[in-house]
Image (cartoon, rainbow, N blue to C red):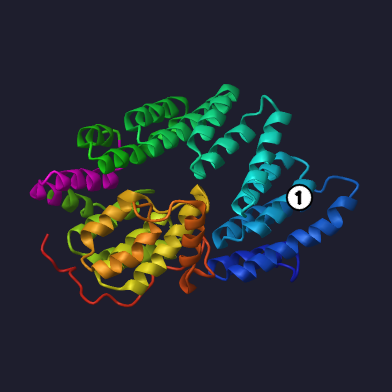
Amino acid sequence: MKMRIQGSYEDLLEKARQARSMGQADLAVWLYSRIIERINMVLPGTKTRDEQLLDYLITAADELHMVLDWMGDHTYAWAICQQVAELDPDEPEVWRRRAATERIYAGEIEEGLEELRQMATEAPEDFWPQVELSARLLELGRLDEAESALDEASRRARNEEERGLAHWIRFRLLRERGEYLEAAQAWKEAREHDPYYRYTVESVYRMFITAGDYSNALAYLEQEENPLLRGYYHGLVSHRQGREARARRSWQRVVQESPYEYQVGKEAWALAQIRLGNARTALNFLNDLTQQGYATDWVYAVAALAWAISDSLGGAQANLDLALRTHRQTFGPWARLPVDLWEEFDELVSNEDLKRELRKFFAVEGEPTSLAGAAEGAETSSGETGEEADSSSDEGPEGPEPSSDEDDEEE
């Protein structure tokens, strides 16, 4: 067995990862920062390229960046990205773009946007600073500016990956405007350019379900390859149409599947269990997933739903905090959890006082949508439970024991 030298870069990196897995985010940040600072002291003076040293630097910086985004410490993330931009000889522009994004997230919005515009001007044929600009504007809700930036990014796209990404962002923009048919067309174009996007069809049929357009929802559901997702949402459409027996049959077929056999869609299996009255079965399963490192925003949100059904405000809030932190790593610090997820809570949770406490986590009408309101939401969602967690943490869905167990309900 290879032995690590105490205090070596390899040793510090392993200790930082262990701290992350245990939810000790502050310790992980200190360890990653120590690696970067030590390398910063020696790398500029090296006469020849040291591949191992560079690998430790980029690995530590990437992982530190993720932890800081999870914690919401965008000021420090901005500083780290600026520092690494000066040290990375291969991709300094990547770190410059990240620094501009973190500057926006830290509150210097116009200054960060101007940095992205300047990078796009300096490299008039480079797709990436332009598409980053459009994505940040979309997150800010400045849809007309986002569309203009996206049009220019689309012009600059030079390969299928870039074209696919541009159409995917256009899908998100059009969905935000409520132009659902046009959004679906943009998704189709994204899929045509990059086959990866066929795995994102869930976003399309969920959009139509939320809009009440069940005909189009079912049409796109036919393109869903995952039987857990396809079965759950077929059942949900039937339920929304008042066809309860058919909905229940769909959900029963889902729970008869072995969810561990599928890479994605496990949350839909848990939702089907909840719909059939088996909240504890769902919660035990979700806890097992997080212990295995499968920790998505939907895992935590569905766990929160199970706690909320059991009237556990603490368990629901703790998991919604984790869900929101995870969600914001992809969609920015002002994002809320999707409205169709709130619809599950609104229907299945009977405690109205509890629901009022949970609404702030979701992008629902009546909650603040301005930057000030979103920042307030970030503060209120940073409860003690998630304070020292990150997306690779082994923390499972938390809260007190459910007050009842309906696992034995006949299916």
Q: Residue at x 74, y 65 (%)?
A: 34
187 vs 99, left or right, is left
Residue 1 in sight in this render:
no
407 vs 173, left or right, is left
Let me know if residue 230 is in the magenta part: yes
Residue 205 drawn at (x, y percent)? 30, 38
Q: Residue at x 51, y 56 (%)?
A: 372
Quadrant (top left/top right/bottom left/bottom right) for the C terminus: bottom left
Quadrant (top left/top right/bottom left/bottom right) for the N terminus: bottom right
Residue for badge 1: 54
Q: Is residue 139 above or below residue 13?
A: above
Taking depth in this image into account, of 174 and 276 the one nearest to the observer is 174
| Amino acid type at image mark 1 | Leu
Q: Is residue 358 above or below residue 342?
A: below
Residue 355 in sight in this render:
yes
Taking depth in this image into account, of 49 and 108 the one nearest to the observer is 108
Residue 185 drawn at (x, y percent)? 37, 26
Helix, strand or loop status at disc 1? helix
Residues in magenta?
224-248
Residue 24 drawn at (x, y percent)? 57, 71
Overall secondary structure of the magenta section: helix
Let me know if residue 213 is in the magenta part: no
Residue 241 drawn at (x, y percent)? 13, 43
Crowd band around label 1 with a 10 angstrom C-alpha radius: few (<14), some (14–19), many (20+):
some
